[in-house]
Image (cartoon, rainbow, N blue to C red):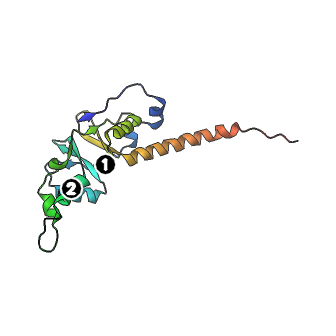
Amino acid sequence: MTATTHHPGNTDAEHLLGTIGEAMTSRVVALAADLPADVAVRRLEHAGVSGAPVVKAGRVIGVVTVRDLLTPAAVASPAVTSGPFLRHEQLVARYRVADLMTTEPVVAGADWPLARAGMAMDEAGINRLPVVDAAGRPVGILTRDDLISALARRLRASLRHEEPARSARRPVMMPD
């Protein structure tokens, strides 16, 4: 598990954006490492998410996406048939989530500045960041969509606060 370092001093950007806990989705779809890949795909699709943290003994040990889970079927599908139809479910069912997940995931704490999460996601090239407690248990997930929404909310709020100040500074037109 890779944790991004957190520096206690907040910059202006960090203060403006707030914390991961304010932006994350607290309803986490977590998948067991020993879950069959076909079951995992159905759970992710049912939840309407494209990826999730993988847990073992309650702790985050990896991250997996629908794409990760379906890759074995996509690779093997041209050659494997069952009757007249390709049997992707059978191909995927051979695997467990642990076989297909990304190990050593980048994780963060809910109290970390959102700006640092954005930088960590960008540097690692990831679209989701599991949020864990001190014991490594999932308490939320921060997606790129969550990050963008939080940024937009904060910027809108900041602009609303600036508008009255801007209008007060407009030059007064004097009659001729």
- Relative to residue 80, is residue 128 drawn left or right? right
Residue 19 visible in the snapshot:
no
- Relative to residue 21, is residue 106 drawn left or right? left
Q: In which quarter of the image is the N terminus?
A: top left
Residue projecting furthest to the right: 176
Q: In which quarter of the image is the C terminus?
A: top right
Residue at image location 47% in from the left, 33% down from the top: 13
29 or 124, nearer to the observer: 124
Residue 95: image tag: none
Residue projecting furthest to the front: 79
Residue projecting furthest to the bottom: 84
Give the class, few, some or many, for how many residues have Cα within 10 Å of label 2's Cα (few <14, many ≥20).
some
Residue at image location 36% in from the left, 40% down from the top: 122
Q: Point out residue 2 in the picture as x, y percentages from the top left corner.
A: 25, 34
Question: What residue did someone put label 1 on?
Answer: 27
Q: Point out residue 50 in the picture as x, y percentages from the top left corner.
A: 29, 54
Which image quarter: residue 105?
top left
- Relative to residue 41, is residue 169 drawn left or right? right
| Cα distance in 3D space between marks 2 and 1 | 26 Å
- Relative to residue 159, is residue 136 drawn left or right? left
Question: What residue did someone put label 2 on?
Answer: 71
Residue at image location 41% in from the left, 36% down from the top: 115
Residue 161 visible in the snapshot:
yes
First in sequence, mark 2 or 1: give its number: 1
Residue at image location 41% in from the left, 25% down from the top: 9
Give the class, few, some or many, for how many residues have Cα within 10 Å of label 1's Cα (few <14, many ≥20).
few
Which image quarter: residue 140?
top left
Q: In the rendered structure, which amino acid carries the disc numbered 1?
A: Arg
Please tell me whether mark 1 sits on a helix, a strand or a loop. loop
Please tell me whether mark 2 sits on a helix, a strand or a loop. helix
Residue projecting furthest to the top: 9
